[in-house]
Amino acid sequence: MRVSVQAEDFNIGEEIEKLRQGRTDLGAIVTFTGLVRDIHGDHVIRKMTLEHFPAMAEKELIKIGEQAKTRWPLENLTIIHRYGPLFPGDNIVLVITASHHREAAFEAAQFMMDWLKTDAPFWKKEETDNGEHWVDAKEGDDIKRDRWT
């Protein structure tokens, strides 16, 4: 399992290769990449800043990855979450799951993203045409997370 909280961008192809290096037994690799949008509601986003508590954020990502490994037969997984100033089109988060079967890889990736959206200690501030504001949590994200309990 690889978990990283970093300011630097990531290369999706390189991360997939690291995960599957030397493996011929994998039947599925599923990836999810979260991106900064240029529109949120009726606001044009110029910049997003992600803040976090470093040790706490990494610890929570590890916990989410470990939970996924106990629930599905995963051979490997990667979670990368960025912080700092980001702009429309930039990568924010990458989740990769590897398993012998696609169902496990798909479900585990979705599980991890649902938990990351609600439980990972990151805070988003958007700079828009109408000024700056912190992004509130969405009730719908809690509902998606809770379906896994």
Image (cartoon, helix red, strand yellow):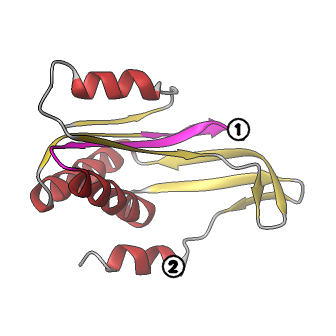
Residue 14 coordinates in the image, percent (x, y)? 39, 21
Q: Give the side of residue 101 with respect to residue 18, left or right.
A: left
> Which numbered dot is residue 140?
2
Distance in Å between CA atoms under marks 2 and 1: 25 Å
The residue stretch that appears in magenta: 81-101
Q: Residue at x 50, y 26 (%)?
A: 8
Q: Does the magenta segment cover residue 131?
A: no
Q: Examine the residues drawn in magenta and state their main secondary structure.
A: strand
- Residue at x 55% of width, y 75% of height: 138
- Residue 123, by quadrant, is bottom right
Q: Position of residue 91 (x, y in %)?
A: 56, 37
Q: Residue furthest right?
A: 129
Residue at (45, 29) in percent of width and height: 12
Please give left or right for residue 26 compared with residue 92 in the image. left
Mark 2 nearby-residue class (10 Å; few <14, some 14–19, many ≥20): few
In the figure, is residue 25 to the left or right of 127? left
Up-down: is 148 above or below 119? below
Residue 44, image x, y percentages: 84, 54
Q: Is residue 29 above or below residue 112?
A: above
Relative height, residue 39 to residue 74 (above, below): below
- Image quadrant where one finds the C terminus: bottom left
Q: Which residue type carries mark 2?
A: Gly
Question: Which residue position holds label 1?
Answer: 87
Give the secondary structure at mark 1.
loop
